[in-house]
Image (cartoon, rainbow, N blue to C red):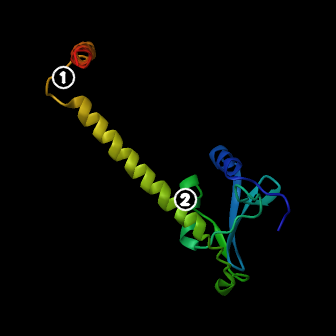
Amino acid sequence: MSAETIDHTTLSLLVEAGAVREAHIVGQPGGWAIMVRYGMLERPLAAQRSRNVRLFRRFETLVSYLKDIGIARFDVDSSNYTPDAINTARRPDRAEELKRAHEAAAYDAWFREQIQASIDDPRPSIPHDAVEAKFAEKCEALRKRMGNR
């Protein structure tokens, strides 16, 4: 495979422009790579962060990805595919972080619902100025009572 890669954005733009001539799915140890031919060039799709060749662990995920960006026809070379070589890099810390993120999002949604329910409450409310005046009266009465002792 070529050392130069293309990213998702570039691939999407090439598909949109009708410049993609062929797409090849190439089996690798541990997954499936996409080779895209456009013009006289053939480049593999790169992963977003690492810029290495992107490997899809599941073929179904790869097919969905290609269909979503507009590539419905492609050929498959499974000669080098070895499912036993899948190196699953598990990250238990990431799972815990995602769990906390989901809990925070659920709490945020609940909190916003409570605030909106308070805003939408049809019961009459007391204006802020009236509450402050009433509290000031109570404080003054308490001061007078404390001063008479």
Name which residue lies at 66% across and 87% down.
Answer: 84
N-term-proximal mark, 2 vs 1:
2
The Cα atoms of the two marked residues, 2 and 1, are separated by: 55 Å
Kindly check if marks 2 and 1 are in contact, taking CB atoms under 8 A apart as contact. Answer: no
Residue 101 percent location from the top left of the image: 49, 54
Q: Is residue 58 left or right of residue 52?
A: left
Name which residue lies at 60% across and 57% down.
Answer: 71
Q: Is residue 82 left or right of residue 148?
A: right
- The residue under label 1 is 125
Q: Closer to the observer: label 2 or label 1?
A: 1
Residue furthest out toward the left: 123
Q: Is residue 48 visible?
A: yes
Does 37 sit above or below residue 28? above
Q: Quadrant of residue 37?
A: bottom right
Does 88 sit above or below residue 105? below
- The residue under label 2 is 67
Name which residue lies at 75% across and 59% down.
Answer: 50
